[in-house]
Image: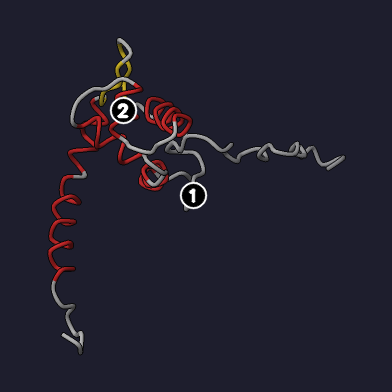
C-alpha cells in the first residue's frame, strides 16, 4: 500500500512476518499455530508424508540415500531428498560419509514416541475384537 509503509508481498512470496513454505521450526508460524508453539511445529514436521517412516528406518541403523530409499519402498527420490533436508535442518538427523543417522535430538524423539508405539499395539488388538457398545457384537 502506498503511503502506509506496508510492503506489498510479491506473488508467490509470504507477507512480512509469515513463514515461507519450508521446514517447520519453533517460533515461526506453522499449521495450527500462528506463534509457532514448539509442539505445533513438531507436529507439523512429523505430520509430513514419509517423515515418521524415515525416522523409524534410521532408528534401526544409519543408511545412505539409496539404502534408505530401498527401505522406504515406493518413496520417490525427490520426496526422500526433501524429508532428509528438512530433518537435517531440524537437527534430527546428521550426515557423515554419505550416511544419514539420527542426531541426539532425533534419538530422543524416537524414544519419546515409544509410548505411542505401545499404545498402537493395544489399539490394534482392541480393533480386532467387538467394539464396546456395538449392538452386533
Q: Along the line of sight, which residue is nearer the eye, 101 or 16?
A: 101
Label 2 sits on a secondary structure element that is helix
Locate residue 49: give its quadrant: top left
Colour pattern: secondary structure
Determine which of the numbered discs, if any, sits on residue 68 in the image: 2
Quarter of the image with the C terminus is bottom left
Disc 1 versus disc 2: distance between alpha carbons? 28 Å
User: What kind of element bears circle 1?
Assistant: loop
Residue at position x 60%, y 41% in the image? 18
Q: Quadrant of residue 62?
A: top left
Q: Where does label 1 land, which residue?
A: 31
Q: In which quarter of the image is the N terminus?
A: top right
> Is residue 35 shown above or below 99?
below
User: In the image, is residue 124 above or below residue 11?
Assistant: below
Residue 47 image position (x, y, % from top left): 39, 47
User: Which mark is in front, 1 or 2?
Assistant: 2
Task: Answer with left or right where residue 44 lies relative to residue 11.
Answer: left
- Report crowding for label 1: few under 14, some 14 to 19, many 20 or more residues within 10 A (C-alpha): few
- Residue 130: assigned label: none
Q: Residues within 10 Å of mark 2 (few under 14, many from 20)?
A: some
Residue lying furthest bottom in this view?
A: 135
Q: Which residue is located at x 25 percent, y 29 percent?
A: 58
Q: Position of residue 121 (x, y in %)?
A: 14, 56
Does residue 53 sit above or below 98 in this rendering?
Answer: below
**Residue at the image position 68 percent from the left and 36 percent from the top:** 13
Q: Is residue 116 left or right of residue 77?
A: left
Residue 95 drawn at (x, y percent) = 33, 17
Residue lying furthest right: 2
Which of the two labelled residues, at mark 1 and mark 2, occupies the earlier sequence position? 1
Amino acid at each position: 500500500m502506498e503511503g502506509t509503509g506496508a510492503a506489498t508481498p510479491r506473488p508467490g512470496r509470504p507477507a512480512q512476518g509469515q513463514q515461507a513454505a519450508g521446514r517447520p521450526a519453533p517460533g515461526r508460524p506453522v499449521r495450527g499455530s500462528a506463534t509457532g508453539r514448539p509442539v505445533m511445529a513438531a507436529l507439523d514436521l512429523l505430520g509430513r508424508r514419509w517423515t515418521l517412516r524415515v525416522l523409524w528406518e534410521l532408528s534401526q541403523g544409519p543408511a545412505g540415500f539409496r539404502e534408505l530409499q530401498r527401505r522406504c519402498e515406493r518413496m520417490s527420490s525427490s520426496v526422500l531428498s526433501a524429508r532428509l533436508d528438512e530433518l537435517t535442518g531440524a537437527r534430527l538427523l546428521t550426515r557423515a560419509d554419505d550416511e544419514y543417522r539420527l542426531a541426539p535430538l532425533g534419538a530422543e524423539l524416537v524414544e519419546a514416541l515409544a509410548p505411542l508405539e505401545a499404545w498402537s499395539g493395544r489399539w490394534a488388538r482392541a480393533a480386532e475384537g467387538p467394539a464396546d457398545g456395538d449392538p452386533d457384537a
